[in-house]
Amino acid sequence: MLVVAVAVVGSLTVLPAVMARLGDRVEWGRVPFIARRRAEGRSRTWTWLVDRVLRRPLLSVVLSAGVLLLLAAPALKMRTVDPGSIGLPRSLPIVQTYDRIEAAFPGAPMPALVVITAKDVTAPAVSGGVAALSRAVVARSGQMSGPVVETISSDRTVALVTVALAGSGTDPTSTAALTALRTQVIPDTVGRVAGTRTYVTGTTAGSVDFNKTMRQHLPLVFVFVLGLAFLLLLLAFRSVVIPLVTIVLNLLSVGAAYGVMVLVFQYGHLRSLIGAQDVGGVIDWIPLFLLVVLFGLSMDYHVLILSRIREGHDRGLPPGRAVAEGITSTAGVITSAALVMVAVFAIFATLSEIDFKQLGVALASAVLIDATVVRIVLLPSVMKLLGRWNWYLPRWLGFLVRPQPAPAFPEIRKVEVQV
């Protein structure tokens, strides 16, 4: 937030001052080869591509949307996990020591911690319940095991029982064992003792509870992000269609990034290529973080494109031509920005910790998909098909959005005169 705020302030103060001071000298130092590749400020490559897209907009929409939906399909089976120590690089000396301890003293890598509170946990009834809990744990050798370690606080109001769970700590085996501990073992033993309260924590419980909380609150985040984006675009472009198209396109690019993460880190495709270990799924905090960050990044250059298209529309250009000019005049800037971001995010994928690898792959793939398939193919083809409906605004919303006056200058046209 601070970086964006500083960038906005600089763009409104320092940048105009520097540009005004430099004047025409801002063109000094242009790279010759790149300068020759551009004609009238537009990229020849993107101009050729956008021209082909706009010639067959319906086919372009079907193919590009189909590719994005195909990439996003694996996200429907996304499994989020908290990897704990499994996500740490095994080359670290402290992790190697941890692995040697686990080999010498085998047990669950991520034990569950059962916390029991009462006025006196050493009372016969509570002690009997804890003993029954220990026996029940030992009896369920397939899901949990002993030895069960019990620790009592100095004021005898809290008892901590360590229970070894089967599995790696975040896999389905551990999750099933945790469910059995919470719903069967504890209610049938210490849970029956009056005056006690029992809680279960640990890495497995934290992962399960975090995922549950995220699923419950994710709709609120979606409503806030999408609703705010809709209102801002409605006020900026005086249209209800543009915000809806923007939201759908952003969701497609985010869904495609989710699908790439599942394919690589959950199903294992190309996972060994970047040296990532198997943690059983996607790191639990990344999907929500990715949604917010990608929406901010994509909205940045999306507004730039739409502003150019809107300018062409206000000058009276036909819908297809306004879209073509808006896309081609900004494609070079967007491509350059996307390449910088992809290069930076790709560095994350080379780091040793699995969190950074997943974040780097997700961000790099999302930006690459968004700046190419979405902005160069899907966006212009959709806007070409919609035509003047892009700028539709119901009359009852007129009091919210004040229409801008028409430009005072006519469209400049090339006229050939024979003398």
Image (cartoon, rainbow, N blue to C red):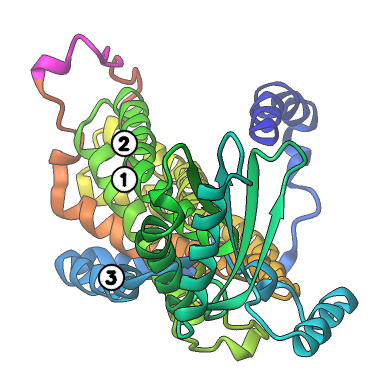
Question: Residue 118 appears at what percent x and percent y?
Answer: 56, 38
> Quadrant location of residue 72?
bottom left
Foreground label between 1 and 2: 2
Magenta-drawn segment: 395-404
Residues marked 3 and 2 touching at CB (< 8 Å): no
Q: Considering only vertical position in the picture, is 50 above or below 297? A: below
- Secondary structure, mark 2, is helix
Q: Determine which residue is flagged by label 1.
A: 246
Which residue is situated farthest in the front direction here? 124
Foreground label between 3 and 2: 2
Q: Residue at x 34, y 17 (%)?
A: 408
Please, what is the three-letter code of the amino acid marked with disc 1?
A: Thr
> Quadrant location of residue 140?
bottom left
Q: CA distance from mark 3 to mark 2?
A: 26 Å
| Mark closest to the chain's N terminus, 1 or 3 | 3
| Mark closest to the chain's N terminus, 3 or 2 | 3
Q: Residue at x 46, y 41 (%)?
A: 304
Q: Residue at x 65, y 64 (%)?
A: 345
Q: Determine which residue is flagged by label 3.
A: 64
| Camera-side residue of 119 and 180 | 119
Q: Give neighbour class at mark 3: few <14, some 14-19, many 20+ (Cα, 10 Å).
A: some
